[in-house]
Image (cartoon, rainbow, N blue to C red):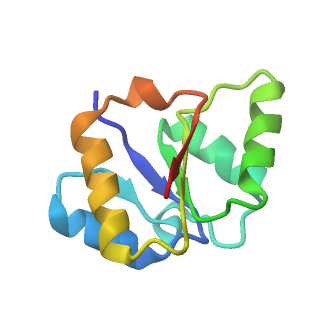
């Protein structure tokens, strides 16, 4: 099964738009569509977990720590992809499209994947 993505509130929404332009069938939910505006990281992780979505974020500073605590509490996560804020929008979209096309959702479970 292909991964479903959930954008964190801090993710540049142009990345979501650009990814969907590459393939509109990618299941990539925006933070506003999920009601995640100003939602604490631990709640965002819980939401993504309930929905079976890999969380996509720019937050390299605090999200990995929250992710570790989430897992340490005995919960399971569909995964976390950290996209470098320095990565151009088009390149980020290409990477996410490639990951969606070439991997399965199971490969991300309880893991952090860093995009350069």
Tell whether 7 sits left or right of 112.
left
Q: Is residue 17 above or below residue 29?
A: below
Residue under the image location 21 percent in, 41 percent down:
101
Task: Identify the residue at horizontal 32%, vertical 29% (top origin).
Answer: 104
Residue at 30% over, 73% down = 90
Along the viewing direction, whichever of 32 and 56 lies nearer the viewer = 56
Question: In this image, 45 relative to 50: left or right?
Answer: right
Where does residue 58 sit, x and y in percent of width and height? 59, 65
The residue sitting at 67% across, 63% down in the picture is: 59
Residue 26 point in image, percent of width and height: 25, 51
Q: Please provide percent x and percent y for residue 28.
A: 36, 56
Instruction: Give the answer, above or below, for where 67 lies relative to 25.
Output: above
Q: Is residue 14 left or right of residue 20?
A: right
Is 59 drawn above or below residue 72 in the view shown?
below
Q: Position of residue 73 (x, y in %)?
A: 83, 26
The single residue placed furthest to the front in the displayed view is: 116
Across the whole image, how many numbered discs are drawn on residues?
A: 0
Looking at the rendered image, the quarter that the N terminus falls into is: top left
């Amino acid at each position: 099964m292909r991964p479903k993505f959930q954008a964190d509130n801090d993710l540049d929404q142009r990345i979501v738009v650009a990814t969907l332009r590459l393939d509109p069938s990618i299941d990539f939910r925006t933070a506003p569509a999920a009601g995640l505006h100003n939602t604490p990281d631990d709640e965002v992780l819980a939401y993504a977990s309930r929905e079976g979505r890999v969380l996509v974020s720019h937050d390299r500073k605090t999200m990995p720590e929250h992710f570790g605590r989430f897992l340490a509490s005995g919960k399971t996560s569909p995964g976390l992809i950290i996209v470098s804020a320095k990565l151009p929008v088009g390149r980020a979209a290409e990477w996410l499209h490639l990951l969606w096309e070439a991997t399965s959702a199971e490969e991300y479970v309880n893991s952090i994947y860093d995009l350069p």
